[in-house]
Image: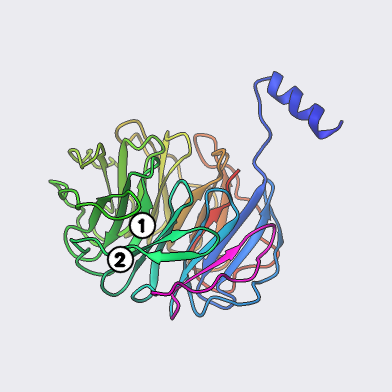
Amino acid sequence: MDPNTLKALQGAAGGSEPYTGDIAVAYNGSPFISVYTWDSGFGTKYSDPATLPSNQGLRVAFSPDGADLAVGHEDSPYVSVYPWSSGFGTKYANPSTLPGGNCWGVAFSPDGADLAVGHSYSPYIAAYAWSSGFGTKYSNPSTLPPDHGYGVAFSPDGADLAIGHDSNPCVSVYPWSSGFGTKYSDPSTLPTGTGRSVAFSPDGADIAVAHQTSPYVSVYPWSSGFGTKYSDPSTLPTGVGRGVAFSPNGADIAVGHTTSPYISVYPWSSGFGTKYSNPSTTPTGSGKGVTWTPDGADIAVAHEVSPYISVYPWSSGFGTKYSDPSTLPTNNATDCAFSPA
């Protein structure tokens, strides 16, 4: 049966084709970034970029149209971006004003017109105009994050930009309109430690922070400012929260963390539901970045200890772990991302 006929039949039956695309993994050993084809399992690893990131890969993100791939890493220039079209193109020129240190967060705006990074030295966050290359760095926010910047995230409508960071308030959010607005007031109940990762829900109604100290994840209503923190989950993540992500339909929230089972997932409906059962084969080390495929049918977690990346089918719970890629990342993985549908 030809693909167009199959697609028509699936549509008539109310189904849809499964996601096929690519999955990128950032990690600590050379070449620091690996990308694989994805079709309900790992396919072949793409050739490494001709110009590698300069040191350990820390964060990775595809642009919304899938045409570019950004890697935050240790050592100057701290962020490297490549054209992406079923393989790496020639690395774009570095920004004229580099981030101020190791890049622990990277995110494109929803319209793809801007690129934000969280980094280790003042001003701790940097944002650039983006159009198939770095434009001029936007002016720093008038109120800087107080310490090392980690995960960054734009709201789904692109109107706000959040960063997790060391030191209270551990998360800062700014209005965004081709530049930083005045920082929103801090939440009345702060995260209890360094904000490692931040994520908005797909409808923009909630914001989550994975953080250093129990309860390891905090979620707040969001409407141009923080609402009252939701109650903690009844079963907490078991260690430091390093990654957080909502499912594409907003019905679930996942946390990567430092102690077994290394990933915890909860139903989400304006509050935490009962934690889903752990996967039968858990990740082998500290969970870090987590992400879903655009259709929500698979969930991936980057982690320490070989195979460094684990992916599971997802349908209101974990399915059997997919086979490992034939060519593994070479060291502890820190983040992962699927290309857009």
Q: Return the x and y of residue 24 as percentages of the image width and height.
A: 58, 60
In the rendered view, does 284 fall on the left or right side of 87?
left
Quarter of the image for residue 2 reads top right
For the stretch drawn in magenta, the main secondary structure is: loop
The quarter of the rendered structure image containing the C terminus is top right
Which residue is labeled 2 in the image? 149
- For the residues labelled 2 and 1, say whether their Cβ atoms are less than 8 Å apart: yes
Q: Which mark is residue 152?
A: 1
* Start-end of magenta stretch: 76-97
Crowding at label 2, few (<14), some or many (≥20) Cα neighbours within 10 Å? many
In the rendered view, does 42 fall on the left or right side of 150?
right
Residue depicted at x 16% and y 61%: 168
Q: Return the x and y of residue 100 as percentages of the image width and height.
A: 33, 75
Label 1: element kind: strand
Vertical comparison of 101 with 69: above or below: below
Q: Nearer the viewer, residue 252 or 36?
A: 36
